[in-house]
């Protein structure tokens, strides 16, 4: 074979291989473009189109008289859009450039640089489609300087972000609660967004209770009604304080940096405003009266259960939690022996002392007793070999009727009455007054403790004697005390205590209105309640009354004081009470006051009631 033949064979072989390669390429292109084209197109779309979550501005909280208790203020921030600051070549060149511009900006506005190489690298790894924050809380002076230098720094932007504010500090602080940044990892809608900008969410108090509302459910603790008969918001999750997020779509490159925005941005549906039943002046006065002591005050509208004031002392300023509380400050609050994070008004369970006696009187009258029947008080009652003093008057009150006993708070009378009735009848009346049951309040509350034979292996007459004067196996919260005091005043209706008046949309229109709810009824006839009210009237308005220090020239009160001894004998102290009600300008109010470590209900709490109504409703005290 000659050289020409081998030359032709080489040409044929090369041609064959070339043809084969082209055939493979053509087949592969056909497979990719025709068979898998739609699938690949979807993958490319998912890779380059990203949705960004836009959080809503949180709704505000107002008192019934229009005072803003929780709101938002604009905080200025300086951010860098790294996608506009990229440098060709290695990533380090971009990082170095961002650091250089951040340092130049810091020098211009007079701040210390805070961005680090680690911050930038982490942001580029996980959030390249979002701007990186360089400085927060920019002052007016810094803002002016920033605007001067902004044209020289490509990718720099000045943005505003809402920051939660509590303009009145501690006032109603425990009720309002506080907020925090949502953890995206536990967010329900995390998988719906590629870049997740989290909400500010409620962490405690009303901020948490009224954060959101799921469709098909009423607002927690509240049977809200739609004012116009139509659903207010057709979103997947109806927004209350938190609002409903918006979103925007952006086109990004292979590294995740934004190239352009696609289509119109869907704005967030900002949170709804809450109007509470609280009267701001009443709340402010109640808290001022508790300054320096440990206790609680609850004021109700006796005709519907609306809470007009609910104070607990000590308290805290929710502003401490914005934007986040330090570990040291939170430990200080948590470890404070006076428990400022604990709301005594509805979370605390206390021995009621003599404020239980109106209920014992109700039990007596409803079980065949007569108010004219008398008991001889000689200063003490011996029960099971144990003497229980009538400590109000050491040598005794002599012959006392129900009215006398309520007026002077005679222990002998109520112990003998309680022993005559027995624990089961007493407990039935206490239960009808709401003791041992939660009131339906919106925030987590105590149920108290209803006395029962089941609580002890052997229930004795001594146990019955103790609960008859508000000691032993019976515990209540100040809120429960206010609820049953209101029931005595209004004819027997126990209203669910309510804090919410209305929900408003962004335009100020009423979206929801709260309606009063009946919780139950006192097991007492109108005639019985009339007699108990008269005894409580004498307690405040007779010269021998144990609650006479509650008298004032603004409102005529009827009431009852209480003093409960607490703790072991070596460290025993007194928790002191006053409950009362009165009518002013056609509105009837019920109040419960608790002061821990007080002297007595008459000396410690009754004067606070007089001062409260004098300062709140006007007039001059006696």
Image (cartoon, rainbow, N blue to C red):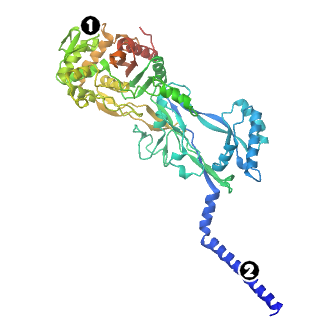
Residue matched to label 1: 394
Q: Which of marks 1 and 2 is nearer the N terminus?
A: 2
Residue at position x 53%, y 35% in the image:
179
Instruction: Tell me if 377 is positioned left or right of 328 in this view.
Output: left
Instruction: Tell me if 363 is positioned left or right of 247 in this view.
Output: left
Residue matched to label 2: 18
Q: Is residue 59 visible?
A: no
Q: Is residue 610 visible?
A: yes
Q: Where is residue 153 in the image (x, y as percent from the top left)?
A: 77, 42
Q: Where is residue 9 in the image (x, y as percent from the top left)?
A: 77, 88
Q: Find the residue positioned furthest to the front.
A: 1
Q: Which of 260 and 330 is in front in this view?
A: 330
Q: In this view, does 73 lie above or below 387?
A: below
Q: Nearer the viewer, residue 388 or 29?
A: 388
Instruction: Tell me if 150 is positioned left or right of 255 in this view.
Output: right
Which structural element holds mark 1? loop
Q: Could you say which quadrant of the image residue 79 lies in?
A: top right
Q: Find the residue positioned furthest to the bottom.
A: 1
Q: Nearer the viewer, residue 32 or 72?
A: 32
Q: Could you say which quadrant of the image residue 368 lies in?
A: top left
Q: Distance between the residues labelled 1 and 2?
A: 120 Å
For mark 2, does the 10 Å Cα neighbourhood hold few (<14), some (14 to 19), or many (20 or more) residues?
Answer: few
Residue at position x 62%, y 74% in the image:
31
Q: Where is residue 345 in the image (x, y as percent from the top left)?
A: 40, 26
């Amino acid at each position: 074979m000659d050289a020409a033949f081998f030359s032709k064979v080489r040409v044929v072989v090369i041609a064959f291989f070339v043809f084969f390669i082209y055939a493979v390429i053509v087949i592969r292109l056909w497979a990719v473009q025709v068979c898998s084209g739609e699938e690949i197109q979807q993958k490319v779309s998912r890779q380059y189109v990203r949705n960004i979550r836009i959080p809503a501005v949180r709704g505000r909280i107002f008192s019934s008289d229009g005072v803003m208790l929780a709101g938002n203020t604009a905080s200025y921030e300086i951010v860098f859009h790294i996608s506009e600051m990229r440098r060709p070549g290695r990533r380090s060149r971009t990082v170095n450039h961002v650091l250089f511009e951040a340092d130049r900006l810091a020098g211009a506005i007079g701040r210390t640089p805070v961005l680090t190489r680690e911050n930038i690298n982490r942001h580029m790894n996980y959030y390249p489609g979002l701007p990186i924050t360089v400085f927060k809380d920019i002052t007016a002076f810094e803002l002016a300087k920033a605007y001067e230098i902004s044209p020289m720094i490509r990718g720099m932007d000045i943005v505003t972000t809402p920051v939660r504010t509590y303009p009145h500090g501690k006032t109603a602080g425990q009720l309002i609660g506080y907020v925090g940044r949502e953890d995206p990892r536990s967010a329900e809608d995390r998988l719906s967004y590629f870049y997740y900008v989290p909400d500010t969410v409620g962490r405690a108090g009303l901020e948490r209770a009224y954060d959101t509302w799921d469709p098909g459910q009423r607002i927690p603790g509240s049977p809200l009604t739609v004012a116009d008969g139509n659903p207010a918001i057709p979103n997947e999750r109806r927004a209350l304080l938190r609002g409903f997020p918006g979103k925007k779509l952006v086109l990004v490159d292979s590294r995740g940096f934004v190239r352009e925005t696609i289509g119109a941005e869907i704005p967030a549906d900002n949170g709804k405003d809450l109007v509470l039943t609280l009267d701001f002046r009443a709340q402010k006065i109640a808290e001022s009266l508790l300054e320096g002591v440990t206790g609680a005050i609850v004021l109700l509208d006796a005709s519907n259960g609306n809470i007009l004031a609910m104070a607990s002392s000590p308290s805290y300023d929710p502003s401490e939690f914005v934007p986040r509380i330090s570990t040291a400050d939170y430990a200080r609050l948590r470890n404070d022996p006076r428990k400022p994070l604990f709301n005594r008004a509805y979370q605390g369970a206390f021995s009621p002392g003599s404020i239980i006696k109106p209920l014992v009187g109700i039990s007596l009258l409803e079980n065949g007793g007569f108010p004219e029947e008398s008991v001889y008080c000689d200063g003490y009652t011996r029960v099971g070999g144990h003497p229980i003093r009538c400590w109000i008057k050491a040598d005794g009150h002599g012959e006392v009727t129900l009215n006398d006993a309520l007026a002077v708070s005679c222990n002998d009378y109520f112990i003998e009455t309680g022993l005559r009735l027995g624990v089961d009848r007493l407990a039935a009346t206490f239960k009808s007054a709401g003791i041992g049951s939660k009131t339906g309040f919106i925030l987590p509350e105590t149920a108290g403790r209803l006395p029962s034979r089941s609580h002890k292996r052997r229930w004795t007459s001594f146990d019955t004697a103790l609960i008859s004067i508000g000691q032993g196996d019976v515990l209540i919260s100040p809120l429960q005390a206010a609820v049953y005091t209101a029931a005595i005043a209004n004819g027997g209706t126990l209203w669910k205590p309510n804090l919410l008046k209305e929900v408003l949309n962004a335009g100020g229109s009423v979206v929801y209105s709260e309606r009063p709810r009946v919780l139950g009824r006192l097991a007492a006839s109108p005639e019985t309640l009339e007699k108990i009210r008269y005894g409580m009237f004498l307690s405040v308005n007779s010269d021998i009354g144990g609650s006479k220090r509650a008298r004032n020239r603004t409102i005529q009160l009827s009431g009852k004081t209480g003093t409960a001894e607490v703790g072991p004998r070596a460290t025993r102290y007194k928790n002191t009470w006053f409950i009362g009600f009165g009518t002013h300008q056609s509105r009837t109010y019920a109040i419960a006051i608790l002061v821990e470590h007080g002297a007595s209900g008459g000396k410690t709490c009754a004067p606070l009631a007089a001062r409260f109504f004098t300062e709140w409703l006007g007039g001059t005290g006696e």
